[in-house]
Image: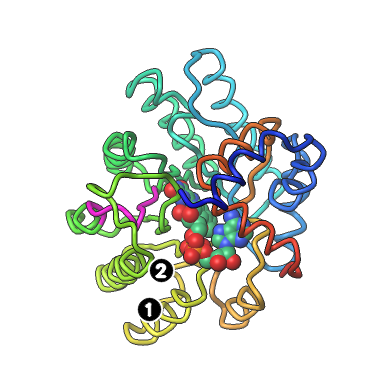
Amino acid sequence: MNIINKLITNTIPLLPKFAVKFIADNYVAGEQSYEALEKVKYLNSKGYHVTIDLLGEHINDNTEVKKITSIYSNLLDSIYNESLKCNISVKPTHIGLDISAEEFNNNCYTLVRKASKLNNFVRLDMENSKTTSQTISTFDNISADFESIGTVFQAYLKRTFDDILKYNKPINFRLCKGIYNESSNISFKNKDEINENYLKIAELAFEKKHYIGLATHDTYLIEKIYELIEKYNVNKNNFEFQVLYGVPMHGWLEKHLKNNFKVRIYLPYGPQWYEYSIRRLKENPSIAKHVAKSLLSNRDY
Ligand code: FDA
């Protein structure tokens, strides 16, 4: 870790809560479901699709895990009742993976069954590499019965290309670089290598006609993806661009919409915003630098 990152990591816990809140307000929709749903309505009115994430992870209390599952279930009802263009993104350890694979599977099934009934969709976020195999396995099992589930693959993991290669029918996945600190035995550390793998996987998805959520703010990658879309004449119904709420995109979102490309905004909310912000910043101090830069830029919506 370089000196600046170390300094940031040591300083963050000393920041007053209001200062962290000031920063988090740019990235988090609020504490309550109704606040997130209000933001969804606004973003829908601007032409964006949304995925809602209830902040939190690593819950190992059964009652709490059931509570989280039912909040997500209620969100699916509200989205349906208010005809919103919005699905849900769920972290496996938020709905039971730290308790057992069975608990996670059961809760996941509950949400996917409900989403299927309401014509909606559940995205399983990808957490650190300890959870990768189980997340993929649960996704594989449930997607054999339901179309309303997708997962995430991380371009920094060396295993990812082969993980996707094994599918002989189209699946629905989000592709991101990956945010956790992984060992160099299993992950690419160099930005160019991660980008190269990202594009290799995107190309594979276009060739094999998987549905891909292209989650990145990296304009180099976005330009290359535009070239691939043209090269493979990819159907607009086979991909979407995805971004985190609050990250400045310098006109790219507007450009996507003008091209009739679907854009989905990942919208986190929940009472856990403080713990979440602190943990993420400590885990990956480079985010702090992005945040500082983005506070000086204009929003796209
Ligand atoms: P890169 O890190 O190179 O960033 C490019 C530029 O974007 C930066 O220079 C900066 O300007 C801006 N930027 C990036 N992140 C920013 C931030 N947080 N705040 C302000 N500006 C920022 N990861 C994971 O492991 N599992 C998951 O399930 C998901 N899910 C997910 C969903 C969506 C919709 C997105 C966009 C991202 C994720 N991620 C994720 C996170 C992802 O793995 C990755 O860490 C970040 O997107 C940053 O990578 P970029 O591709 O944006 O490139």
User: On the image, numbered disc 2 is attached to which residue?
Assistant: 238
Quarter of the rendering containing residue 204: bottom left
- Residue 300 located left or right of residue 51: right
As for residue 158 lying within the magenta part, the answer is yes
Q: Does residue 279 lie above or below 264 as drawn?
A: above
- Residue 43 rendering spot, x and y as whole percentages: 72, 60
* Of residues 83 and 158, the one drawn nearer to the viewer in this rendering: 158
User: On the image, numbered disc 1 is attached to which residue?
Assistant: 234
C-alpha distance separating marks 2 and 1: 7 Å
Q: Give me the disc on residue 83.
A: none
- Residue 148 rendering spot, x and y as whole percentages: 43, 46
Which kind of residue does numbered mark 1 sit on?
Answer: Val
- Residue 20 rendering spot, x and y as whole percentages: 74, 41
- Residue 235 located left or right of residue 59: left
Q: Does residue 44 lie above or below 186 as drawn?
A: below
- Give neighbour class at mark 1: few <14, some 14-19, many 20+ (Cα, 10 Å): some
Q: The magenta stretch spans which residues?
A: 151-160
What residue do we see at 50% from left, 39% from top?
A: 90
Quick one: SS at disc 1?
loop
- Residue 226 rendering spot, x and y as whole percentages: 44, 81
What residue do we see at 74% from left, 53% from top?
A: 26
Residue extending farthest to the front is: 3
State which quarter of the image contains the C terminus: bottom right
* Of residues 6 and 195, the one drawn nearer to the viewer in this rendering: 6
Residue 215 shows in the view: no
Residue 102 shows in the view: yes
Q: Are marks 2 and 1 in contact (CB under 8 Å)?
A: yes
Which kind of residue does numbered mark 2 sit on?
Answer: Asn
Q: Does residue 48 lie above or below 172 as drawn?
A: below
Quick one: SS at disc 2?
helix
- Give neighbour class at mark 2: few <14, some 14-19, many 20+ (Cα, 10 Å): some
